[in-house]
Image (cartoon, coloured by chain):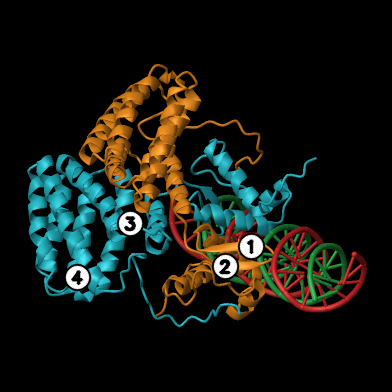
Chain colours: A cyan, B orange, C green, D red
Amino acid sequence: MDIQIKRSSLPAQVAEQIQGLIESEALRVGDRLPPERDLAERLGVSRPVIREALQVLSQRGLVAIKPGCGTFIQEPSAQHAADMLKLFFKMGNCRGSLDDFFALRRSLEIEAAGLASQRATEADHAALNESLAAMQTNTEDLDAFIAADLDFHLAVARAAHNEFLLVVLEPLVSIWSQVISLSSQAQGAPRVGISYHQKLAARILERDQQGAREVMGAHMQASHRFAVKVQAENTNITDHTIIHESTEDSNEIPSAG
Amino acid sequence: MDIQIKRSSLPAQVAEQIQGLIESEALRVGDRLPPERDLAERLGVSRPVIREALQVLSQRGLVAIKPGCGTFIQEPSAQHAADMLKLFFKMGNCRGSLDDFFALRRSLEIEAAGLASQRATEADHAALNESLAAMQTNTEDLDAFIAADLDFHLAVARAAHNEFLLVVLEPLVSIWSQVISLSSQAQGAPRVGISYHQKLAARILERDQQGAREVMGAHMQASHRFAVKVQAENTNITDHTIIHESTEDSNEIPSAG
DNA sequence: TTAGGTATGGTGGTCTGACCACCTGAACAA
DNA sequence: TTGTTCAGGTGGTCAGACCACCATACCTAA
């Protein structure tokens, strides 16, 4: 009877087809796609359809559109994946509580600390020390302190030399630093973390895996406690949304009546 | 001098503007955007520009386009975030090795097992047992066995009742099951995992957190060893790509020149 | 009165053809 | 050889039109 409900739009179909060619390696990284006009003619659709399909694939990180030059196949970058995850952590409808957030972060940070203690290079040690120094010299400038704190944790994640881990951990740490920077009631707390960071950097330098994991675990526990306290004081961080930003834009798109 | 290079395309600018309105909560979940024609007129651009911008936002999971009805603001769903992550794990240019993959998976699965032991409901226990039974009755049908194996791990992740964790873990488990199902040399190995799963389900039922974590840790270690063995035999899994699928499509988009 | 079908307006989906801005590379001139 | 110039191709954008679909309000028939 052929009465199957076929609802996918033309651009979606085109995008799927091209993505299929990429997955099957009929199209490889670096290949240039035919011009939009050719694609349109070949697939029997109009150019806007092709353009929307390419827009979708570009958004997925599968193609790079270069004006005046062409459209090229590329691999989704780690940064791209991290950005997507960050968007979800920031605005997703996840009903996760602060506890859930820290449960995930703790397990990942401990793993990162353990790996870092085994794999850190001299450059990694330098990065850790640099962030540590920045924290110590900015105990009064909250924003600078938080930025340095963020840098330190990212340095640990990078020192783990595990890209899978980094992709997941980076958004968590970034989101968290955004949350923290919003709660200016955090005065006094900054100094608490420095000793943990000092110990952690030392364990990593000594290649003491167990020690590094334990210090990071303790640090996460302390951060978690601090977060709960901040949460109780600051309604900006609710049980439902991790972030509640309120930027003052002057855009002008009202919602339709 | 104002010679700054301003390269962002119109659709990108429109998408950013609308996303900004969403982030600043000037537009809230469920709100309907003005019709494309209105938006085009209001922003002084053509309709295709608006359409491409909405296509981008839709891809990010921020809006839902309903033909004949309108375009509505929505929150990025967990499934959407997981799909993006899956795409990266599948085709990303991450140079992570099998060891890195398992380091991440181990830390997350152990955390999931620990949480599941504390939070699992009766429905969760039932789901675990169902997957377990499916594994036991399909020791000869490799595909069915792997599907049941996947279900079991997802059931554990769900039993943890931590959406953050689930979003990250689900893609890892799914990708891994795809890899495994490709290596048909895995004969004999299926039965190995059943005892681990049995023990794990028991620990979760007993609400024995430490026991659950230990069993999962041992299970991951065994899986890792097995994976290394498979990797050595199967060139499909290289040190660079986790997945190397080769579907036979009959599409017809050759690469340009 | 009420249930159902129908007409209508609005929405997104698609097409066409045109023009612009930019990049590339080849032809040309110094 | 080197530098400039020019032409072609590419993506970027526009305008207007028509279609398919959905929701609603209206109208008809029970």
Indicate which label's residue lies in the foreground, 3 or 2: 2
Q: Give the class, few, some or many, for how many residues have Cα within 10 Å of label 1's Cα (few <14, many ≥20).
A: few
Identity of the residue furthest to the top in this view: B188
Question: Horizontal and vertical percent for residue A4?
Answer: 73, 44
In contact (CB < 8 Å): disc 1 and disc 2: yes
Quadrant where the C terminus of chain B is found in the figure? top right
Near mark 3 (Cα within 10 A), the count class, few <14, some 14-19 or many ≥20, is many
Disc 4 marks which amino acid? Ala
Residue hosting label 2: B72
Q: Which residue is mark 4?
A: A144
Amino acid type assigned to the residue bearing label 2 in the image: Phe
In the image, is residue A217 above or below residue A137? above
Most foreground residue, A213 or A118: A213
Q: Which mark is residue A171?
A: 3
Distance (Cα) linking label 1 and label 2: 8 Å
Gap in angstroms between the C-alphas marked 3 and 2: 26 Å
Instruction: Say which chain tag 3 marks.
Output: A
| Element marked by disc 2 | strand
Q: Relative to B189, say whether D8 is above or below.
A: below
Residue A133 seen in the current view: no
Q: Is residue B209 above or below residue A255?
A: above
Mark 2 belongs to chain? B
Name which residue type carries label 1.
Lys
Asked if the residue under mark 2 is in contact with the one under mark 3, i.e. CB atoms within 8 Å, the reply is no
